[in-house]
Image (cartoon, rainbow, N blue to C red):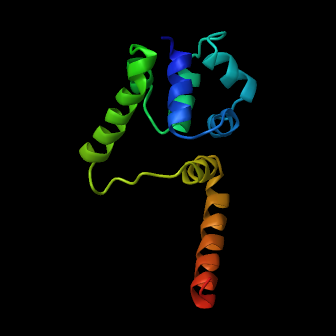
Amino acid sequence: MNIGQAIKFLRIHRKMTQEQVALEADMATSNVSRIEKGQRQPSQKVLQKLAMALDTKPSILYAASEHSPEDIVDFLRQEDDKEKHEGNPADFHFTHEAKMVLSLFNELTPNNKSLLLEQLKTLHKWQTKTGQ
């Protein structure tokens, strides 16, 4: 199996579309498609983005690519279980939306970060008061 097939299996395992992965990885859907079909090999930078979008590590993708198609789903389930059980209880498992917000937040200037935090605090207070 190649790395593209491992990415595809993991994407399907995560119940994500190519469009969702592309959006999370900040790349074109056509690139995700070409990688999955083995028409293009991802660079290290692209592989890291894809791994982050799929909530895994590049090393997991490499390891998954060493498995046969019949064994890959079991391998991915085992890795998910390991991640859940080996992680520190204080660790957070962010949703894809939360990861995207954090990614965008990190790209803001310090001044804009401060403004956004104040807006979020205000929105939270309003939501708490209105019970929404």
Farthest-out residue, bottom: 129
Place residue 129 in its image quadrant: bottom right
Q: Can residue 28 be seen in this view?
A: no
Give me the residue at 52% from left, 39% from top.
Answer: 14
Q: Where is residue 15 in the image (x, y as percent from the top left)?
A: 56, 41
Farthest-out residue, front: 70
- Image side of residue 16 versus residue 94, left or right: right
Q: Where is residue 89 in the image (x, y as percent from the top left)?
A: 27, 56
Q: Position of residue 6 (x, y in %)?
A: 50, 21
Question: Against 16, is 102 above or below?
Answer: below
Classify the position of the C terminus by image quarter. bottom right
Q: Where is residue 39 in the image (x, y as percent from the top left)?
A: 66, 9
Give me the residue at 66% from left, 40% from top.
Answer: 20
Question: Against 16, is 1 above or below?
Answer: above
Give me the residue at 41% from left, 14% from top.
Answer: 68
- Image side of residue 55 versus residue 132, left or right: left
Q: Is residue 1 visible?
A: yes
